[in-house]
Image (cartoon, rainbow, N blue to C red):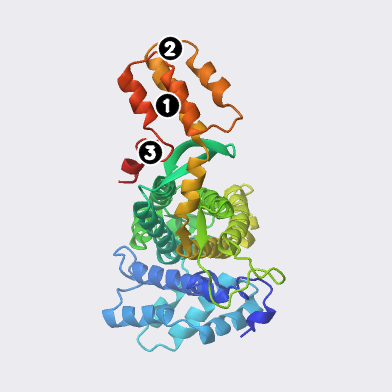
Amino acid sequence: MLNPLFALSPLDGRYRDQMGHLPVFFSEAGLMEYRLKIEIEYLIFLSEWKDIPQIKPFSKKLKDRLRKLYVDFGIHQAEAVKEIEKVTSHDVKAIEYFLRDELNNLSLFPESALEFIHFCCTSEDINNLSYALMIRDAVRKEYLPRVQSLISQLARMARQWKSLPMLSMTHGQAATPTTVGKELMVFVKRMERQVEQIKAVKIMGKFSGATGNWNAHMVAYPQVNWISFTRQFVRSLKLEPNLTTTQIESHDWDAELFDAIRRLNSILLDLNRDMWFYISRGVFQQKVVTGEIGSSTMPHKVNPINFENAEGNIDLANALLMRMAERLPVSRMQRDLSDSTVQRSIGIAFGYTVLALDSCLKGLTKLSVNKQKLEYELNSNWEVLAEPIQTIMRMYGVTKAYEKLKELTRGKMVEQQDLVDFVDRLKIPKEAKERLKVLTPSTYVGLAEKLVE
């Protein structure tokens, strides 16, 4: 096996240990295994279709033995397929021949059924279903669990700090206060919405021959309801049948899924940049890890490296996801092969995405809140109370309320006493004055806490 130090891609090198089971799904060997699974499940399905008398139903023992071929598929089997491909120069045909060789050596398998391997199939029938299962498994087993872990961590932090007031910054300037927890909950809700959209994408499969018309099928068995056959077979794989296609499945669902993942990544990018700025402001502090070095020359540095790494990996992931979403649904007339090479990089997009998720989660777990800094910022920006004061003034009919507060506060440092004196001079009810005079930047947080709950 290639030493990771010599890998061309950092996903197979530096970050190999962080990829989880993604290589199992998206590697060349993984694609072979999925192709073999489709060929075998199709063969079993054919044997059970009553209108095809030349192939008899397989026994449970034989079906178990057939399925064991793809369940136990490993490096030695993958190498055998590659040896066959050296002769065929065709990767799907190599799988077919590999399966034939295996079944020739399987005494349980009837010789008369050998010719039903890959029966009436075009390569794309096998490939599109293989990629559909591959992507579905990667999303369910590797991608979504990471997203859910990140959302759960954010939600815990939001609940923990739901009441902790914080100065907001709009356009980089002091603005209406909020709470730390509410600002984190914004990202929780945004991501949860995208998760629902990702889950709602129907992963589709095509299985209708050379140009999507079941041409050869109808010549061989005109009495078979091939549309019903295909619908049931594709659904047996827990995929949604696409019955109206060219030679290839149209890839529209791929684009829907990749766009949804890209949107979630963009939200994640927004979160990472906010965390970076909060750390820069001193609102958040990072835990110091023993032995870790922030700078080769400045010993004091504790860099927000996890959020920076996440940001860079999101950039790479989204560039690939966007290009694939644009490219895959486009194919000349009934078929060209430009999608094939693009599909082989799907795993790379997922790889950079899971790296970003892991980096962000790691960064979040290292954060603590600097309450003294939060209090200092709030107490240094009393001008943010110009908003509620002018609002109450309008409520009681004071003319040019906004303009008067603008003159008092815009671009100026305002102290608490300045606001108290201003309120005392207003011609508004005493109760309203008292309500404004006890208001502080720390208490002016609206319904922020309730939004977390």
Q: Earlier in the sequence, mark 1 or mark 3?
A: 1
User: Amino acid type of disc 3?
Assistant: Thr
The Cα–Cα distance between marks 1 and 3, rounded to whole angstroms, is 12 Å
Q: Position of residue 371 (x, y in %)?
A: 45, 53
Number of marks in the rendered image: 3
Look at 36% across and 48% down and name the residue there.
162
Q: CA distance from mark 1 to mark 2?
A: 13 Å
Comparing 337 with 100, the one in front is 337
Local crowd at mark 2 within 10 Å, few (<14), some, or many (≥20)? some
Q: Quadrant of the image for the N terminus? A: bottom right
Of the residues shown, which amino acid type is indicated by label 2?
Val
Callout 2: SS: loop
Give whichever of discs 1 and 2 has the lower sequence position.
1
Report the residue marked by disc 3. Answer: 443
Marks 3 and 2 in Cβ contact (< 8 Å): no
Q: Decide which of 374, 133 is in the foreground and name it.
A: 374
Q: Position of residue 321 (x, y in %)?
A: 58, 54
Residue 16 appears in the picture as rendered: yes
Residue 366: numbered disc: none
Which residue does the numbered mark 1 point to in the structure image?
A: 388
Give the residue drawn at x 65%, y 56%: 338
Residue 345 vertical placement versus 180 (above, below)? below
- In the rendered structure, the answer to whether residue 401 lies left or right of residue 428 reads right
Whether residue 300 sits left or right of residue 423 in the image: it is right
Query: Circle 2 is placed at which residue position?
Result: 398
In percent of the image, x 41 and y 66: which residue is there? Answer: 141
The image shows residue 265 at horizontal and vertical percentages of 52, 52
Image position, residue 337 (x, y; %): 64, 58
**Crowdedness near tag 3: few (<14), some (14–19) or many (≥20) residues, C-alpha within 10 Å:** some
Distance of label 3 from label 2 (alpha carbons) = 24 Å
Q: Amino acid at mark 1?
A: Pro
Report the front residue among 349 and 361: 361
